[in-house]
Amino acid sequence: MKKTTFIIFLCITLILLSFVISPHYFMDNVFAADIMHWGSTGERVRQAQQKLINWGYLKGSADGIFGQMTHDAVVAFQRRHGLKADGIIGSQTLSALGMSTKSSGSSGSGSNIARQDEKILLAKAITGEARGEPYIGQVAVGAVILNRTRNPSFPNTIAGVIYQPGAFTAVDDGQINLQATKDSIRAAEDALNGWDPTGGCIYYWNPATATSKWIWSRSIVKVIGKHNFGV
């Protein structure tokens, strides 16, 4: 009788444990599918490789195979942007790359997440580049970044434009990693919704601090706050 009671107790315990463990196991595997590391293959790896190639971190082709060169490129990218340099493309690195944490085959919610990620990244760039500027000036900086995504001379994604080597001081000095201000988030939303105070400009610079002689070869279209905006 005691043996039968013990067996019943053991069975009930195992059933209860399955309810506790299974959801965590399931969730871990869902998120693991979005993590890329040495040995990973597929379209998501190819997309990440192409971004790293566009920004000068990876030499070679985007073959969809995560090997030594891809690992080294990811580490270099992570170090440049204040992330844990482990060579693993997890959620934070995906966000910095401008990639959704949902696989490309997911439903519409994935595109919503990607859109939210882009807005926050744009807001961080605005914070780093234009906090302290009048609100219209913050929107203008966001608009310049978006205008570049539509210009063939620049990368065609928000993350690609922002992280293009040497493009923005906020990336070079780490201010891109500051928390986005409320105004910058609103400015990013306005820019994403189509407000362009610059009228299509793809450059801006502060004449008081600009050190590049080349930037003065650009035609000034507007002056907003402390920034010149030009083409």
Image (cartoon, grey):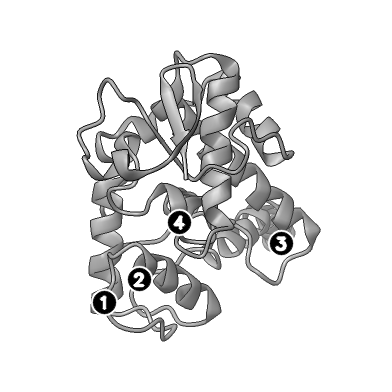
Name the residue: 28% across, 71% down. 58
Amino acid type at mark 3: Cys
Which label's residue is closer to the chain start, 4 or 1? 1
Q: Secondary structure at mark 3?
A: helix
Residue matched to label 2: 53
Separation (CA) of disc 2 from disc 1: 6 Å
The 10 Å Cα crowd at callout 2, few under 14, some 14 to 19, many 20 or more, is some
Mark 1 Cα shell of 10 Å, populated few (<14), some (14-19), many (≥20): some
Q: Position of residue 207 (x, y in %)?
A: 31, 25
Which residue is located at x 54 percent, y 22 percent?
137
Q: Which residue is mark 4?
A: 160
State if disc 1 and disc 2 touch (CB < 8 Å). Answer: yes
Q: Secondary structure at mark 2?
A: helix
Instruction: Estimate the x, y position of residue 124 in percent, counting from the top left.
Output: 47, 32
N-terminal of the two: label 4 or label 3?
3
Indicate which disc, 3 or 2, sits on the residue closer to the N terminus: 3
Question: How far apart are labels 4 and 3 at the CA level?
Answer: 54 Å
Report x, y in % for residue 158: 53, 51
Q: Which of the 4 image quadrants contains residue 40?
A: bottom left
Q: Is residue 224 above or below residue 153?
A: above
- The image's mark for residue 59 is 1
